Image (cartoon, grey):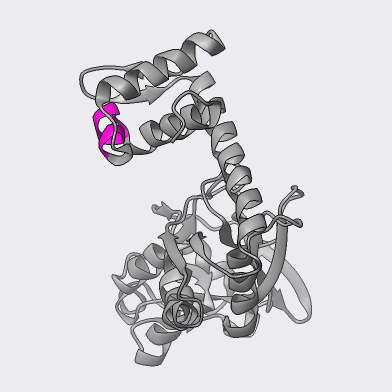
Amino acid sequence: MDLNGRSGEMEVFVKVAQEGSLSAAARSLDLTPSAVSRIIARTEQRLGTRLLLRTTRAITLTAEGQAFLRGARRILADLAEVEEAITDQGVPRGRLRVSAALAHGRMKIVPLVAAFSARYPQVLLDLMLGDEVVDILGGQADVAVRFGHLPDSPLSARCIGETGQVIVASPEYLQRHGTPAEPEDLLRHNCLRFNFRRAAPDWPFRRDGLEFSLKVGGTIECSSGEALAQLARLGAGIARIGAFSVTDDLQRGTLVPLLEDCNPGDREPIHAVFVGGTAMPARVRVFIDFLVEHHQA
């Protein structure tokens, strides 16, 4: 690593932010903590601002540090992509960071990993499962699998499938609280809902050819569809979630579908999102193609 170059300084800063301490970053980079500290201090002096706030317990980033981190990740990713585009000669290799939601990743992406790795043994697949949205332009991932209609952005996307929604509850919950016969009955039930901003605040229905929605309420909100399914299985309430995530529960009878005659049949697209362009690494291209070929919603 060229410690005197700006890219080297960026690598050190990104590693410190990732590890959360100077000593951990130093071990990862095979440097001394004092060398890492000097590099950070030199970067801050050149920029004329504080990037890190250091205490005896933790390191936190300032607002300027957060901005520098996003830019550094993006620049380092661009440098790596340019070098790989020149040296790879179309052979997929290197680390591929893939972000996917917890339930969908576990059920639909993980089962594809072994076959992908067997086909492309020189690609190190780094799979990150979680329901937070990663910053692809900021260099946090190479590919992210996302649900729903995508906002305008400079990112590229390919549709790999779609999924429907189903309203479910456990037999135990229905025995205690009754089974809703009409959508309006949900207003008297504890409805388990998503808490992220893109989630629709109302649940949609169709009856007698007319579409309408109801603003349901409850005592629990969550960012994870898998967690909502688990809560429904435990009898905490009624959930409306992706059908793919409860297929096994419906077959076993641990969850029961509700109001299917009023299901509007809405479908949610599933996209693989990535940075496109001529410099896109071969490992990203072949992984996207693999998802399109093998993914089943």
The residue drawn where x is 38% and y is 83% is 249
Specify the quadrant that holds the N terminus. Answer: top left
Q: Relative to 52, is 31 on the left or the right?
A: left
Q: Is residue 143 above or below residue 103?
A: above
Q: Relative to 162, is 29 on the left or the right?
A: left
Specify the quadrant that holds the C terminus. Answer: bottom right
Q: Is residue 250 above or below residue 76?
A: below
The magenta-colored residue range is 20-27
- Most extreme residue toward the left is 56
Near-viewer residue (107 or 42): 42
Tell me, yes or no, if residue 134 can be seen here: yes
Q: Is residue 86 magenta?
A: no
Q: Position of residue 231 (x, y in %)?
A: 34, 66
Among the 4 quarters of the image, the one containing residue 165: bottom right
Tell me which secondary structure the magenta stretch mostly adopts. helix
The residue drawn where x is 60% and y is 64% is 284
Q: Position of residue 31 (x, y in %)?
A: 29, 31
Q: Position of residue 139 (x, y in %)?
A: 55, 45
Q: Is residue 113 above or below residue 155?
A: below
The residue drawn where x is 49% and y is 61% is 94
Tell me, yes or no, if residue 180 can be seen here: no
Near-viewer residue (118 or 91): 91
Q: Is residue 57 above or below residue 111?
A: above
Near-viewer residue (236 or 107): 107
